[in-house]
């Protein structure tokens, strides 16, 4: 068993070091490990079977639908309307544009389910505006990059669906509801940090909007925000499942973008569908390859070995959770979120189960942890998108990111050690 683990780890690290795409690195390292333990024919057949069964899930149908809904929303002029609404809410305070940035990222990230999309859509508009108003360019970019991750916790979120699969069937509806308090708490923490910096630097405040102007902007944004109400309300009310809700989201997004707002033309739909297929194919390949790796991990009893090692190291629940968080923080710096969730969920879930921690609580903790990785070098995808939008470099951005990292880690610790923050809403709605 020790040699199999060595083959798996070394081959995976070498493949990643040579810039082999992560899905292929996972699949090839799994195949090398299987070839080390079982004959060639059965090994290849087993990999194919595990990849096929890994994506043979009704719940996974929600992913392409939510991706398509996010693509339609991203092209449908939603970002501009949400920014205008956020200005009405918080733009009049000192440093108000910073708060507008965070609130808009929270709204758009929740609607699109993508941190990168939120960075592009909100940052593409807000960063130049903030630059023009005298805000520091690196502060603007750092704020956008970190705020965009809130949408991965506030539903509907594709990564929560991926975690549901990796954990063996935690309720998607429960995960969706559980993400609200942590996501909002993270957003408020970022607003607090931005407020302190804005006060110290004496950033300007916006004008208080007139009542009728505020009503118009609210009316413009309500149809977009209704997507969240329809999806989550329908799931909580038992009207439809999370997978069915994703189809409803597509229909609503299509009507909103094409018919109501008229920002997406019919001849643009083919491009949107093609982009959706590309993203879906990448996600499904990752899920299939990771399912095969999860099988070999289980076959070699690796999760049980790691669980035994951690528990034998210390019986302190506090220390074990701290160690897991530290490992995930390191993992997040070199691995994207989806493969990290698929690979490390089956490894750490048995560990936290022995501590009496619910899979629901662990899932939100893990995803919040890996959100930090999206904003850190060397492979933080959202960080690189933000640098491109903000026309800056990671080196210049590093100092501005530090206070927001402190906030994200502080919120992570609160979520880790106060289960109520994650479990209160699912308990209230009868999911626990």
Image: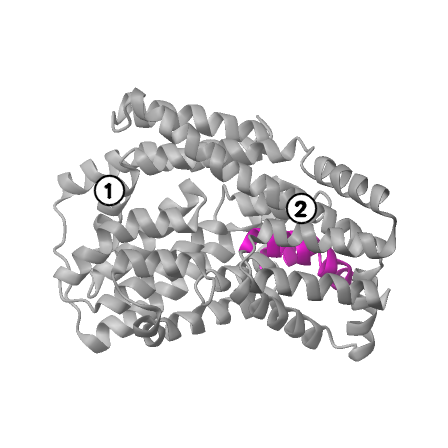
In the picture of the structure, the residue carrying the numbered disc 2 is: 289
| Image location of residue 40, percent across then percent down | 83, 46
Query: From mark 2 to mark 1, how far is it between C-alphas?
Result: 38 Å
Residue at 60 percent of width and 30 percent of height: 241
Q: How many labels does the image show?
A: 2
| Helix, strand or loop status at disc 1 | helix
Mark 2 vs mark 1: which is more N-terminal?
1
**Highlighted range, magenta:** 337-365
| Helix, strand or loop status at disc 2 | helix
Residue at 78 percent of width and 56 percent of height: 33
Say left or right for 387 vs 243: left
Locate the N terminus and report the quarter of the image it occupies.
bottom right
| Image location of residue 290, percent across then percent down | 67, 49
| Image location of residue 227, percent across then percent down | 41, 33
Q: Which quadrant of the figure has residue 41?
A: top right
Residue at 83 percent of width and 57 percent of height: 36
């Amino acid at each position: 068993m020790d040699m199999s683990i060595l083959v798996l780890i070394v081959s995976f690290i070498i493949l990643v070091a040579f810039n082999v795409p992560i899905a292929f690195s996972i699949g090839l390292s799994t195949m090398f490990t299987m070839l080390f333990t079982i004959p060639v024919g059965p090994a290849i057949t087993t990999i194919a079977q595990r990849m096929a069964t890994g994506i043979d899930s009704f719940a996974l149908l929600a992913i392409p639908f939510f991706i398509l809904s996010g693509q339609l929303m991203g092209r449908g002029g939603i970002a501009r309307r949400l920014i205008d609404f956020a200005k009405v809410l918080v733009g009049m305070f000192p440093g108000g544009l910073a708060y507008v940035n965070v609130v808009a990222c929270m709204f758009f990230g929740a609607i699109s389910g993508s941190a990168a999309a939120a960075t592009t859509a909100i940052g593409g508009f807000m960063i130049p505006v903030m630059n023009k108003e005298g805000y520091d360019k690196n502060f603007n970019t750092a704020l956008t990059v970190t705020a965009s991750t809130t949408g991965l916790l506030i539903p509907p979120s594709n990564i929560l669906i991926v975690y549901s699969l990796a954990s063996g069937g935690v309720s998607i509806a429960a995960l969706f509801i559980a993400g609200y308090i942590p996501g909002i708490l993270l957003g408020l923490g970022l607003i607090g940090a931005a407020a302190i910096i804005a006060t110290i630097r004496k950033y300007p405040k916006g004008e208080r909007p007139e009542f009728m102007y505020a009503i118009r902007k609210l009316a413009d944004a309500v149809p977009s925000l209704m997507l969240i109400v329809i999806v989550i309300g329908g799931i909580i009310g038992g009207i439809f499942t999370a997978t069915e809700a994703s189809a409803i989201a597509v229909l609503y997004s299509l009507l909103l973008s094409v018919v109501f707002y008229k920002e997406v033309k019919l001849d643009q739909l083919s491009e949107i569908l093609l982009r959706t297929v590309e993203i879906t194919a990448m996600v499904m390949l990752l899920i299939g390859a990771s399912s095969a790796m999860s099988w070999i991990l289980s076959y070699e009893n690796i999760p049980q070995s790691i669980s035994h090692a951690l528990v034998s190291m210390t019986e302190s629940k506090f220390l074990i959770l701290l160690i897991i968080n530290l490992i995930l923080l390191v993992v997040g710096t070199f691995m994207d979120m989806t493969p990290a969730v698929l690979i490390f969920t089956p490894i750490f879930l048995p560990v936290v189960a022995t501590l009496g921690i619910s899979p629901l609580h662990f899932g939100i903790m893990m995803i919040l942890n890996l959100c930090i990785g999206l904003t850190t070098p060397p492979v933080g995808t959202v960080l690189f998108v933000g640098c491109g939008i903000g026309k800056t470099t990671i080196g210049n951005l590093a100092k501005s990111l530090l206070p927001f990292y402190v906030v994200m880690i502080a919120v992570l610790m609160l979520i880790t050690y106060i289960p109520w923050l994650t479990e209160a809403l699912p308990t209230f709605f009868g999911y626990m």
